[in-house]
């Protein structure tokens, strides 16, 4: 199971990386960003959903508090879809960092902790790259 989950996690990076790469071949940056931000919001929501599964299995203590906390990724993801691009990327990036910091000590399986660390690093790098690309595009447009 861990091997399949690991492989699927890495496949899940394709849209994050792909939206950056398609801008290099001439795809409109705003279209690519729409794809990126939508996928990022979905994945952040998914991370909160993982906790619902753990809670329902009785794998996490203080279930009533943790169920409420598990709603945060979805709410932050939704908020990121409502704000300007240059705010959305840091909001999502910080949400990914915050959720990883909250989740990391709770993860019992070492393989999952290691995979989540690597996946989170790439996801955060993609958010940083997108922020820089949008900043550059805004700077060029303003000049």
Image (cartoon, grey):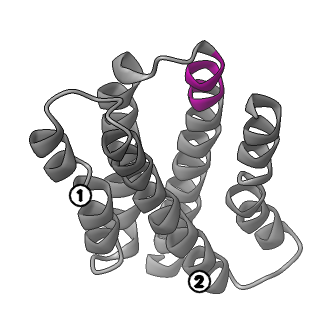
Residue 7 within the magenta-colored segment of the rendering = no
Per the model, the C-alpha gap separating discs 2 and 1 is 29 Å
Residue 88 is drawn in which quadrant?
A: bottom left
Give the mark, 2 or 1, whose residue is nearer the N terminus: 2
Q: Is residue 137 visible?
A: no
User: In the figure, 13 relative to 143: above or below?
Assistant: above
Q: Label 1: how many residues lie within 10 Å, few (<14), some (14-19) or many (20+)?
A: some
Q: Label 2: how many residues lie within 10 Å, few (<14), some (14-19) or many (20+)?
A: few
Q: Secondary structure at mark 2?
A: helix
- Residue 70 or residue 27, whichever sits in front: 70
Q: Report the residue at 31% width, 41% height from top.
A: 55
Please state the horizontal and vertical placement of residue 2, each as a whole percent of the image. Answer: 74, 30
Q: Secondary structure at mark 1?
A: loop
Would you say 79 lies left or right of 133 here? Answer: left
Please state the horizontal and vertical placement of residue 141, each as a whole percent of the image. Answer: 51, 80
Q: Is residue 31 visible?
A: yes
Please state the horizontal and vertical placement of residue 66, each as a whole percent of the image. Answer: 19, 41
Would you say 99 lies left or right of 30 here? Answer: left
Q: Tell me how many marks there are.
A: 2
Name the residue that disc number 1 marks: 71
Residue 45 is drawn in which quadrant?
A: bottom left
User: In the figure, 33 relative to 113: above or below?
Assistant: below
Q: Report the residue at 23% width, 54% height from top.
A: 72
Q: Which mark is residue 31?
A: none
Magenta region's main secondary structure? Answer: helix
Label 2–label 1 contact, CB within 8 A: no
Name the residue that disc number 2 marks: 30
Q: Report the residue at 56% width, 18% height from top.
A: 109
Considering every residue shown, the one lying at the far right of the view is 25
Magenta stretch, residue numbers: 111-117
Q: Report the residue at 51% width, 70% height from top.
A: 37
Please state the horizontal and vertical placement of residue 43, each as a whole percent of the image. Answer: 52, 59
């Amino acid at each position: 199971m861990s091997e399949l989950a690991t492989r699927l996690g890495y496949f899940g990076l394709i849209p994050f990386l792909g939206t950056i790469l398609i801008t290099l071949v001439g795809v409109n940056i705003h279209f690519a960003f729409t794809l990126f931000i939508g996928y990022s919001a979905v994945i952040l929501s998914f991370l909160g959903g993982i906790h619902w599964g753990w809670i329902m299995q009785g794998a996490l203590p203080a279930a009533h508090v943790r169920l409420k906390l598990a709603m945060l990724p979805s709410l932050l993801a939704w908020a990121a879809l409502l704000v300007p691009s240059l705010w959305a990327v840091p909001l999502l990036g910080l949400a990914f960092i915050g959720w990883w910091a909250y989740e990391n000590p709770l993860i019992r399986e070492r393989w999952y902790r290691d995979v989540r660390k690597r996946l989170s690093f790439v996801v955060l790098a993609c958010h940083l790259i997108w922020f820089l690309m949008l900043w550059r595009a805004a700077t060029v447009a303003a000049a």
